[in-house]
Amino acid sequence: MDHYGFNEDIRNRVRKEGAKPSHNQETLLREAVPFNSKSHQVTKNFKTILTPILGEFTRAVSNVSLVKEAAQSDEMETYIESLLVQVAEDVDVDDEESRNDLVRFLKTFLFAEGGEINPVHPAIYKFIPTKLSKAAVERRLAIYAKEALVQDKHVFAEIFNKTGQEDIITGLILEKLDDGVTVERKDEKPSYKPLLPKVSRLFENDLRFLAEHQQYFLEHYAKFINYFLFLYLSQLSLCFDEYEGGKYDEVRSFTYGVDWEAINKRRDTVDDTRRLFQRVDNLFIHVNVLAQLSHVNFNDGRDFLTYVDLMEQVHQASSEDQERFLINLNAWITHYTELIEVEHVKGNANSIAEAFRNLKEYVEKGVSDKVRSEYNSSVKFIAKEHFLKNRGNLGAVLNVNQDFLLMMTALCVKDERIPLNQLFAEYEKRGIRFDNHSQVEVIQLLDNLNIIDKKSDSGDAQYVKPIL
């Protein structure tokens, strides 16, 4: 076997089916992105699927699954209601009418008007159902968030456990639901490869802090997960588009506007939004290119490899083996152009870096523009609800509203006051930059809310106080 050649599965990844080639998404043991060509049909209503995503994500980090009876129930509400009846039966009451009143109260306490579960405690998220199919977009995104963002799930399991400090009603409900709705999760092979360690570390540190403040956690958990999913996918798009120069252990910031200010076309956020989504528009292409390249024989684990991974591996080889890899890569590109019936106008590349770019250009020709656009649109759909705002002729622009800004401020400051300029540096660590106009608006808001401490040991220096 040629160690620097490509295994036969690369031909299964791209094969001729009728008039057009098919780009199979399922030939690697771990992938980099959770979307498929149909994901946009679900993510376009991201607001409606975020709660089920939180349910499956919470179970994944808590190492539990829904019991069979609950998982197969058409209406989780009906199943849980039967458990609430059992809760009421365990309580001493004067008569059956009082017991029925208690059951009605428990239902009102645990369910919102539309029948959705009301997360009155972090542990309640474990009982929010998600579509069971592994192909379901909600489940794929939840597992992706867990595998890409969480490296130490045992720490986070504690967030969603009963502590014994709950009020009596919540404690009774949790005890019954823990026994009746979830079981220990069976081990599953990871589906996605974590690629951005700095984003993961930020996520873990911020989630730990958020969890220390239970009520604030309940109010902001959904938006927190939503943002880090968007941050991760947007940063990954940047790294892929930089080929072998991708900076996977960095977080690049983009300029956001604030919700209540006017924005014109000369503002940095307009250019940054356009620049970001130009990169995102290449995500589907790079995922396909890298999936093909990941079938190189030295990738014994059939794991997703980035351009950086490939370069690092090949550069450790002898000059003869490097040349062999380039020959094999050029041969695959020639075969691919034959599959997609496109003239191989570029000829053989003279370097591996050039070959990467050649393959990317041919994959652009080999995939449907419609599928590419729909696939990439899922990233924008994930951002749409909270982090983009339609600005008329300018279109959708990166944006923070007051609630999200205050949440990020709480995460940046944590327990001790910090200098105002450090706050803006902390925003940037999390991918959010403000131009001078927006900084003025942010400072004014924090000042109005009495979060800025003007009296400090440094005279005129300003500090931002902890919010929580």
Image (spheres, rainbow, N blue to C red):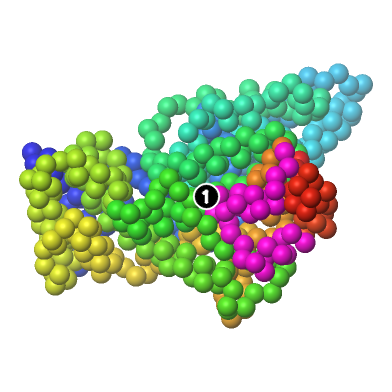
Answer above or below: position of 156 versus 340: above
- x, y percent for residue 315: 20, 44
The image quadrant that residue 432 belongs to is bottom right
Please indicate whether residue 132 sits to the left or right of residue 319 in the image.
right
Which residue does the numbered mark 1 point to in the structure image? 229
Tell whether position 423 is magenta: yes
Give the percent coordinates (x, y) of residue 96. 87, 25
Q: Quadrant of residue 73?
A: top right
Q: Residue at x 55, y 42 (%)?
A: 202
Occupied quadrant, residue 368? bottom left
* Residue 251 rendering spot, x and y as whole percentages: 48, 51
Q: Residue at x 77, y 23 (%)?
A: 165
In the orientation shown, which residue stands out farthest toward the front? 459
Q: Which residues are magenta?
A: 416-444
Label 1 sits on what residue type?
Answer: Leu
Task: Answer left or right for 69 relative to 36.
Answer: right
Q: Indicate whether 458 appears above or below 263.
A: above
The rendered magenta stretch, by its main secondary structure, is classed as helix
Inspect this view and state whether residue 113 appears.
no
Question: Compared with residue 459, is residue 69 higher up or lower down, i.e. above or below?
Answer: above
Where is the N terminus found, in terms of image quarters? top left
Q: Residue at x 39, y 35 (%)?
A: 190
| Residue 47 as seen in the image, left or right of residue 109 | left
Label 1: how many Cα within 10 Å (few below 14, some 14–19, many 20+): many
How far across and how far down the image is residue 52, in percent?
A: 58, 45
